[in-house]
Image (spheres, rainbow, N blue to C red):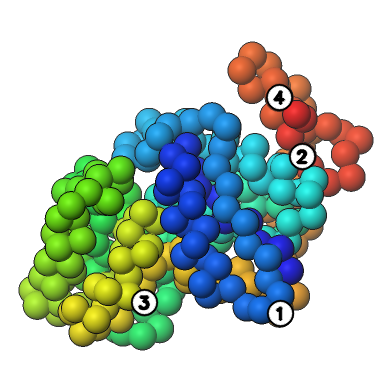
Amino acid sequence: MHIRVINPNTTRAMTDLIGRSARVVAAPGTVVDAVQPTMGPASIESHYEEALAVPGLLEQVALGESEGVDGYVVACFGDPGVDAARELARGPVIGIAEAAMHAAALVGRRFTVVTTLGRTTARARELADRYGFRESCVAVRACEISVLGLEQPGARERLTAECRRAVQQDGADAVVLGCAGMAELCAAIADDIGVPVVDGVAAGTVLVQSLLALGLRPGAGGEYAPPPAKPMSGLLAGFEIRADAAVPVAVA
């Protein structure tokens, strides 16, 4: 079983962190690799950056399809490009927000999402609604630390304090960490605040692994059917879908 975890931004240190976090929960015999696009933003903290990250994400899915990858984790809490990736991939594609919210709802009736910047909280709420967790997600909080600032001194303490407020003020039974860059802080924060803390990278990896073990993959028809072959132009010419391809892949 080969799972590819895709960091949609282009920061190598975060890709390495994500890979370590995913491998910790991988079953014996499961190969997990972590990759990043060759193009795109250094971090994703706006709708603009999220949109510009999607072509690079799809590039990595297309490469994975040519290399025999079985399933994918999209390691950004905005779940950018997940629907499009599901049209390209033969196996399951899971975003870390969706995975983390499902996991949190299984260990508590109420959860709070603690994310990076305040400007990203609306996206987290939108995803909670889309995934059916409007009632379970009691709050979305921001620790006001940028994605690339999560490794700076004091970041863990500030994040932990916000997670503790989620328990004390929101009445949350569980906390969802709203950024892939928080993955390695998950266990320590859970120990500090005394409730389950969910990292979407780990949850997504286990969920993809479980779907593959169950033999569950997207259907060949319906909304996630392969996209139709048609020309692309300009900067997107390399993403043209070939009519003669055995499986849909972007033209390199």
Q: Earlier in the sequence, mark 1 or mark 4?
A: 1
> What amino acid type should be assigned to the residue bearing mark 2?
Val
Pointer 2 with pointer 3, Cβ within 8 A: no
Q: Residue at x 68, y 16 (%)?
A: 233
Which image quarter: residue 154? Answer: bottom left
Q: Residue at the left extreme?
A: 169
Residue 56 at x, y percent in the picture: 57, 35
Q: Residue at x 66, y 46 (%)?
A: 61
Q: Which residue is labeled 4 in the image?
A: 238
Pointer 1 with pointer 4, Cβ within 8 A: no
Which image quarter: residue 162? Answer: bottom left
| 90 or 147, nearer to the observer | 147
Q: Residue at x 79, y 54 (%)?
A: 68
Distance between mark 1 and mark 3 Cα atoms: 22 Å
Q: Earlier in the sequence, mark 2 or mark 4?
A: 4
**SS at badge 3:** helix
Q: Is residue 176 left or right of residue 142?
A: right
Question: Is 203 above or below relative to 143?
Answer: below
Q: Is residue 132 visible?
A: no
> What amino acid type should be assigned to the residue bearing mark 4?
Gly
**SS at badge 1:** loop
Q: Earlier in the sequence, mark 1 or mark 3?
A: 3
Q: Which residue is labeled 1 in the image?
A: 214
Q: Is residue 184 visible?
A: yes
Q: Which residue is labeled 3 in the image?
A: 104
Q: Earlier in the sequence, mark 3 or mark 4?
A: 3
Residue 19 at x, y percent in the picture: 52, 58
Pointer 2 with pointer 4, Cβ within 8 A: no
